[in-house]
Amino acid sequence: MSRIAIVGTGYVGLTTGACFAHLGHEVVCADVDADKIDRLSRGEIPIVEHGLDRLVEEGIRSGRLSFVIGAAQAVTSADVVFLCVPTPQGQDGSADLTYIEAAASEISPHLPYESVVVNKSTVPVGSARVVERVLDRPDVKVVSNPEFLREGSAVQDFLHPDRIVVGSTDQAAAIKVSSLYLGVAAPVIVTDPASAETIKYAANAFLATKLSYVNAIAAICEGVGADINDVVLGLGYDHRIGRDFLRPGPGWGGSCFPKDTRAMLRIAEDAGYDFGLLDGVVAVNEEQFDRVVRKVGEAVGGVLDGRTVGVWGLTFKARTDDLRDSPSIAIIGRLQAAGANVRAHDPTVSGPKPGLPEGIEICTDPYAVCEGADAIVVLTEWDEYRWLDPAKAAGAVANRAVVDARNLLDRNEWVRMGFSYQGIGR
Ligand SMILES: NC(=O)c1ccc[n+]([C@@H]2O[C@H](COP(=O)([O-])OP(=O)(O)OC[C@H]3O[C@@H](n4cnc5c(N)ncnc54)[C@H](O)[C@@H]3O)[C@@H](O)[C@H]2O)c1
């Protein structure tokens, strides 16, 4: 079993740390956020992630999982150090490596001789070299091991991944990192760092492409009178296409796809390739936000100014509390810019929170959103919205109109209650 340090205890770092402790390794997780570390040390999970609380508790109880403030303290006796810090979008669209470089420079003097540093953050091609240069430690090898987990099913994805990708120019370092995953049944692809880094961006860009594709087909369905749900069913049974990521919606978002597609465009540009296909994918997504806003405008009679819109769902998808680059935020921003007043509910939001647009009223009961609303919009596919009672909503709204941007509700039930119903692609 190995001694592992995790630098950056966020969605990826905490999941990685807790899962490696579960696999039997000795793990120290570090973060610069003292409050987060304090809560974690008490077994309190600062994020919504199914099954993570049980693993953290198990790790603390077994003595294999601990939390410290600051990276330097975490790495002093580590065999392998995972960098799981943010890589946000830089001003020119490329990934901003400031956090990675800062973490590398902080740990460099404290790394044990011949330890291995792993880039688990999503980093552009060439980043393994960047870290090597900042570390300036010839005895320390840098390996790329991108993470493919999805928020909402992070633990399951980490412990049962489709594949593990390890990129290294050093065979011993690659074996060291691969062997940490003993006990995880998945193919391991060992390659060079540039290929490993490219795999991650290519995967996210492909998934975003599938989503934009299905949203574009949904727009066509609306024009020709087809039903996207049936179209997707017919497409998804084709094994060459597959069902995953073929669900139409309000547009894609979240902490990865927007920044990773833009970074991929930048990588392509730097490589001398005009990635027009991916440009189109991003453009379709922006259009999708506008399409949803237009639907809400139609639902309230054409003019959004002064209207009240009730929003169900703020997170970028269900089963997470992550609001980063959520389509809801983009759509609410557009509704507000058109003069609408927005009241919103989300199961993970109980009041003002960083990342939420100013001026929205947060309701802690989904029916409270309906009071006086000229339209209700479903923006996140939380299961609990599926079962909301249209009769109860009808008694509260000012105007019976619903825009279901997730095709979540039972259309017939809502229409029976006198609501005008607009879904996506049907
Ligand atoms: N969130 C996902 O679903 C997901 C999936 C796959 C890959 N990724 C990638 O993983 C990386 C991390 O993403 P995340 O969502 O976990 O981010 P996050 O913002 O949830 O977590 C990052 C953490 O790093 C901490 N941090 C920053 N600098 C630090 C330092 N010098 N020392 C110690 N801690 C430091 C921050 O305080 C924060 O807690 C990104 O590159 C992201 O693209 C994310």
Image (tube, helix red, strand yellow):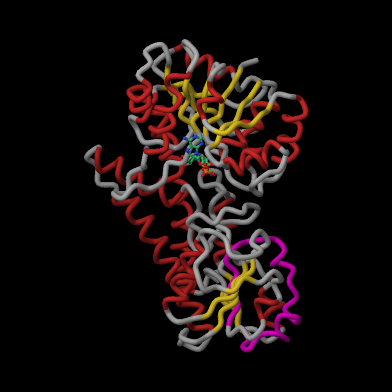
In the image, residue 382 lies in the stretch drawn in magenta:
yes
Farthest residue, direction left: 272
Task: Tell which of 389 and 9 is nearer to you.
Answer: 9
67 and 379: which is toward the camera: 67
Q: Quadrant of residue 271?
A: top left
Q: Position of residue 71 (x, y in %)?
A: 51, 29
Q: Nearer the viewer, residue 116 or 122?
A: 116
Give the vertical position of 144 relative to 49 (above or below).
above
As rendered, which of 235 and 68 lies closer to the eye?
68
How many numbered badges does the structure rendering display?
Answer: 0
Residue 116 coordinates in the image, percent (x, y): 48, 18
In the image, residue 209 lies in the stretch drawn in magenta: no
Residue 218: image location, x then y, percent: 49, 65
Query: Which residue is at 47% across, 51% downward?
Result: 210
Q: Residue at x 57, y 51 (%)?
A: 236
Q: Residue at x 66, y 29 (%)?
A: 66
Q: Which residues are magenta?
A: 375-399
Q: Quadrant of the N terminus?
A: top right
**Is residue 324 toward the left or the right of residue 22 in the image?**
left
Q: Quadrant of the C terminus?
A: bottom right
Relative to 421, is 99 above or below? above
Left or right of 134, for residue 35: right
Residue at (38% x, 48% y) in the render: 89
Which x, y percent locates residue 3? 61, 18
The quarter holding residue 33 reads top right
